[in-house]
Amino acid sequence: MNRGSFAAAGTGGPVGRTFEARARALLARPEVRRNLAAAMDRSAVLRQRAFEGVDLGALRAAGEAIRAHTVARLDRHLARWAERAEARGTRVFFAADAGEAVAYVLEVARRRGVRLAVKGKSMISEEVGLNRALEEAGVEVVETDLGEHIQQLAGEPPAHITVPAVHRSRAEVRDLFARAYRAELPDEDPAHLTRFAREVLRERFLAADLGITGVNFAVAETGSIVIVTNEGNGRMCSSLPPVHVALMGMERVVPSFRELAVLLPLLTGSATGQRVTTYVNVVNGPRGPEEPDGPEELHVVVLDNGRSRILRTRYRSILHCIRCGACLNVCPVFRQVGGLAYGSPYGGPIGAVLAPLLEGFDRAGDLPWASSLCGACTEVCPVRIPLHEHLVALRADVARARAAGLERRAFRWWARAWASPGSYGLLARLARFAQRPFVRAGRIPRAPFPLSRWTRGRDLPPVARRTFRERWRRGGVKGGA
């Protein structure tokens, strides 16, 4: 995964190797918090309206069961899907990692002499760093989803799974368009800005040699792929260019359209607050001899990139995710800093779990701490992934993996000391003495290293003047500390 593009994201992205550094840069931009809060509040209202009159508990339970069943038998469903897709003329490539996925797409582009590629939304393309690889190979890449296009003009990656430019104001978008296209835009009305973008992108659609999209679901029963969008760009990317390449995480398969009928309303209602999205494109293969439109070639790249490793762990249910973004919308941490702070294509609670598992603890091991553990993400997840439980477990795993020999010995000594009443009492008396220079008005606002990182964002209570045992022995338990 090309993490560098997220750590220093172009002209306006936060720079830093850690979540803390990137978050600090974003917190210094009050307009980000303001725009995020307004958008997230609006999403919550729309989601509630979308599921009015629906037994959401039963629907979520059904969605969870479908995803659990499918992921548990993933090899079987993928094999069935690939067999039926290839029977319809689709070329299926299973990529073990990001390098293989990118190499395959580059070979298709080279063989077809591609100079211009138009892209629909694809988190997998962000995961593997496809845009940069294509551009380095001489292919111009144009993001055609409006939010993605805005972020591309700004030199930033997407800041949200479903609404990539959610942190931007209308005025920012107008200024970006005016600078990028040297155009006079009289106002920041969304309808006018959208119309302008449509006119610019229409020429790109007609001239493109290659269309690239993501895949929301792959239907094993028929060998189909399903692309869900609210803009016509997904259909344009998949039907106008002579070659269509679809990028898909290996977990996105469903057994049949029966299961798809359950997951689609969960996806659209949770993502955008719609009972049904504007476009649901079912692609069954390349253009047939009697068909008037569609690509000459359809390639589907199925990416592993660490997913099969997750299947063998206690975090398997993270692969149930249908990429609705609902957990981002309710997360109090995400609502403050947005997706660019996570340094990964996947932000919010889902990213705080998925990124460390895919990228490794060295690159993304700080993300499980980017959470208040309030559990709102689990409550809102349409397929009931226990996100907050995964975050707690990951914190423990990361701590174990990172603990140096000296740190382990220190904690072993600490555990032995606290296991003995005598040594515990001695430590309490020493702490009472050592804390005196740091206590202010009954609190410790600044503690010495290594506790200084803790007090950077909160006060510590001082050690009590007497321990419970001391008070008990003196008969003063009822009298306060």
Image: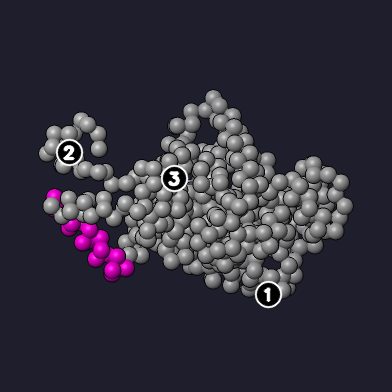
Name the residue tied to disc 2: 471
On-image quarter of the C terminus: top left
Question: Which comes sooner in the sequence, label 3 or label 2?
Answer: 3
Which residue is rendered at x = 18% and y = 34% of the image? 477
Question: In terms of depth relative to the viewer, which is nearer, 105 or 239?
Answer: 105
Which residue is rendered at x = 24% and y = 66% of the image? 409
Q: Amino acid at mark 3?
A: Ser
Q: Amino acid at mark 2?
A: Arg
Dot in front, 3 or 1: 3
Q: Which mark is residue 23?
A: none
Callout 1 crowding tier (Cα within 10 Å): few <14, some 14–19, many ≥20:
some
Q: Assign the magenta stretch its main secondary structure.
A: helix
User: So how many labels did they put on this image?
Assistant: 3
> How far apart are the two marked residues, 3 and 1, measured between alpha carbons?
43 Å
Name the residue tied to disc 1: 137
Residue 434 in the image, given as x and y percentages of width and height: 29, 55
Instruction: Please tell me whether residue 103 is drawn above or below residue 67 in the rendered image.
Output: below
Q: Which residues are magenta?
A: 404-421
> How far apart are the two marked residues, 3 and 2, measured between alpha carbons?
35 Å
